[in-house]
């Protein structure tokens, strides 16, 4: 679906004339010139977002802005829009907004890998690395021996620890982030800079993970 088709679809399914005006105004930010409704038809939050973007365009061109938008009482809209208006942010003395967390979804059905935003990264070969990741997403951080016992099977402590380190390294490489999976003080955990999810529960088709999944439905220890 191209940009214009998205625009028409958004307008078609807008639930009310007021919402349709807001949708049209916000789409005009994506496709300038497609038509911005009269300001009087817009909700206060959308009026603020447009005002912030207009002020950003003026400041980016090097011209002064006589009156910056009044941002009092618009917490959500300000936070949402402040990421895209650095010049306005500096003029108002706002702090840098917190970085939006990356999203990673473990895919275990149809094709094995991790969905990072719009990018799918396949995991080739055996799926024990993703089984370890699945455990951490579903059950949370835990001492590495507990995770190894759940997803890697039997072996000497030295051999299992070597496998854990190998799988952690594979996952970090897969995700492109050395802090995505942590092994510190004998404990495995996931980096809080990511939003993690899986398709293990209620997914369609067979799960392709290697290793036992008994822990998935088991209660916490």
Image: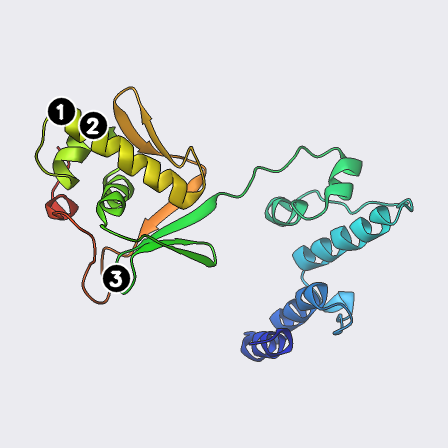
- Neighbour class for label 1 at 10 Å: few (<14), some, many (≥20)? few
Report how far apart the C-alphas of labels 2 and 3 lie in the structure.
28 Å
Contact? badges 2 and 3 (CB < 8 Å): no
Mark toward the viewer: 2 or 3: 2
Residue at 16 percent of width and 41 percent of height: 151
Front residue of this view, candidates 103 and 70 = 103
Residue 165 rendering spot, x and y as whole percentages: 28, 31
State the residue lying farthest toward the top: 185
Residue ID for mark 1: 157
* Image: 137 above or below 43: above
- Mark 2 lies on residue: 161
Residue carrying label 3: 109
Q: Are marks 1 and 2 in contact (CB under 8 Å)?
A: yes
Q: x%, y% of residue 194?
A: 43, 41
Residue at the image position 23 percent from the left and 49 percent from the top = 127
> What's the residue at 23%, 40% (across, down)?
139
Which quadrant of the rendered structure holds the N terminus?
bottom right
In primary-sequence order, the first of circles 3 and 1 is 3
Compared across the picture, whether 129 is left or right of 213 comes to: right
Does dot 3 land on a helix, a strand or a loop?
loop
Classify 10 Å Cα crowding around label 2: few (below 14), some (14-19), many (20 and above): some
């Amino acid at each position: 679906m191209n940009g214009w088709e998205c625009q028409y679809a958004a307008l078609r399914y807008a639930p009310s004339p007021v919402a349709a005006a807001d949708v049209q105004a916000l789409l005009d930010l994506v496709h300038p010139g497609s038509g911005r409704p009269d300001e009087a038809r817009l909700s206060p939050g959308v009026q603020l977002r447009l005002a912030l973007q207009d002020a950003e365009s003026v400041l980016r061109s090097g011209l002064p802005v006589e009156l910056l938008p009044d941002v009092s009482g618009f917490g959500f809209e300000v936070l949402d829009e402040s990421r895209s208006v650095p010049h306005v942010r500096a003029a108002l003395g706002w702090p840098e907004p917190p970085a939006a967390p990356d999203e990673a979804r473990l895919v275990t059905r149809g094709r094995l890998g991790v969905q990072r935003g719009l990018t799918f990264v396949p995991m080739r070969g055996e799926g024990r690395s993703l089984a370890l990741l699945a455990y951490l997403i579903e059950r949370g951080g835990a001492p590495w021996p507990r995770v190894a016992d759940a997803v890697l099977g039997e072996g000497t402590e030295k051999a299992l620890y070597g496998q854990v380190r190998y799988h952690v390294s594979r996952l970090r490489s897969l995700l492109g982030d050395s802090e995505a999976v942590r092994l510190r003080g004998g404990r495995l955990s996931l980096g809080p800079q990511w939003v993690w999810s899986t398709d293990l529960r209620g997914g369609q088709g067979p799960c392709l993970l290697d290793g036992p999944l008994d822990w998935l439905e088991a209660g916490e220890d």
